[in-house]
Amino acid sequence: VNCAGRSINLALAARGIRALERARVMEHIRPLLIAMRGRMLHNRSGECELQRYGRRAEEVIYSVGRAALNRALLDEVTRHHQVEVKFEQTCLRANLDTDALSFRDLASGLTYEKPLTPTIATDGAGSAVRVSLAAAHAISAREEPLDHDYKELTLPAQDGRHALDRGALHIWPRGGFMLIALPNIGGSFTATLFLPRTGAASFGALATPARIREFCAREFPDAVALMPDLVHEFTQHPLGQLGTVHSAPWHIGGRVLLLGDAAHAIFPFHGQGMNAAFEDCLVFDDLLDEHEDWALLFDDFESRRRPNAEAIAKMSLENYEEMRATVLDPTFKRHQELALELEGRFPDRFIRRYSMVMFHPEIPYAEALRRSAVQADIIAAIDRDPERAATLIHERLPPID
């Protein structure tokens, strides 16, 4: 599985872990993980500040390489003899009129069809199944692009070791853009630069090696010192695009269901795209025991997951603003410290939004979004009048089940 130069490292959190444990594959995944206890913020002078993700030592997220995870999951799939795995097959379209899926064998170039009913389409953000259903006016679908793109870069290992703290997700927040770096097994970091497409500080402006070097040395000097292949990778690696997928409905009766990114791809800024897709699988697995009819199962699945998919899409975009700009704001820092204090004092009622999303899979995304709005109002009020904390929290935040 070759993902080099075109992928953003994955962050595995509690929702994804719970699904992988249900599938009994976590024992094969754990050796691939590196725990990250917080965000390490880098300013232009090279000074660093760690903002921890959680209050407890076990509240961490895990960096995992996309290719290694894909291989581990494929290895697990091939252990199930009732599953037929085929490589080099491209899905072209779903045809509702003929109830067929069209494929192309990439080795021979030949096309062929398979019965459509039932199909669970997990063919990603660029889903050919979703596109063909939309073209047939069976569903509505649109992609909401971000006006920022991304480029993958590398901080190689130094004498087999990580050049930066391996226990953190490193961020160089610069207001309108940012660089991030996640640790890999073996000592390297996969870095991702997020920049506007056009403008003074943009990918469009970095058209020559000299401009690339000057911009990166000015904005990320401590990172550039650790990136000997910066210009080569910058010019050779493809530019990645970012977007949110909105589609409705996700299913056509009991014939076909869109699941994961095919139905609801999101921006990567909350580290939840993979986790949300794994949680889709968990919910689908639960519903298999409740329904014998595919149409009822697909409909129930969509009704349960759609509000949560919409909530995490909204939170993912908001987290981009937080990562590249808000983390540096003194008011944000003060409110974060206050939120941590409240979480310690009222653990059954007050849990920060990031913690609800990353460490509490029992709290649906939609509920995390709703409660976080209430909590933001409470924090703003308490910031003005600390004595009101207990009253406001007991009045406005019921205990979490």
Image: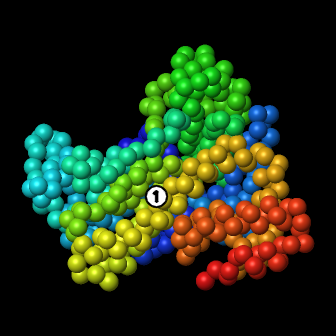
Q: Position of residue 302 (x, y in %)?
A: 37, 68
Q: Is residue 116 in view from this perspective?
A: yes
Rendering coords of residue 188 (x, y %): 58, 44
Numbered disc total: 1
- Residue at 85% across, 61% down: 383
Q: Nearer the viewer, residue 250 or 273?
A: 250
The residue tagged 1 is: 274
Apparent side of residue 55 relative to residue 86 in the rendered image (left or right): right
Taking the spot 51% from the left edge, 68% from the top edge, the residue there is: 15
Answer whether residue 154 is visible to the viewer in this image. Answer: no
Q: Position of residue 3 (x, y in %)?
A: 41, 43
| Callout 1 secondary element | helix
The residue lying toward the viewer, choosing from 30 and 7, is 7
Is 44 or 256 nearer to us in this picture? 256
Q: Residue at x 77, y 59 (%)?
A: 336
Under mark 1, the amino acid is Met
Location of residue 190 with respect to 195 vertically, above or below: below
Mark 1 is surrounded, within 10 Å at the Cα level, by few (under 14), some (14 to 19) or many (20 or more) other residues, namely: many
Answer left or right for 258 relative to 369.
left
Res. 105 image quadrant? top left
* 301 sits to left or right of 395: left
The colour scheme applied to this rendered structure is rainbow
Judge by depth and name the residue closer to the eye, 228 or 7: 7
Q: Residue at x 79, y 71 (%)?
A: 342
Could you tell me residue 248's position as x and y percent?
35, 57
- Image quarter where the C terminus lies is bottom right
Q: Compared to 376, does 301 lie above or below?
A: below
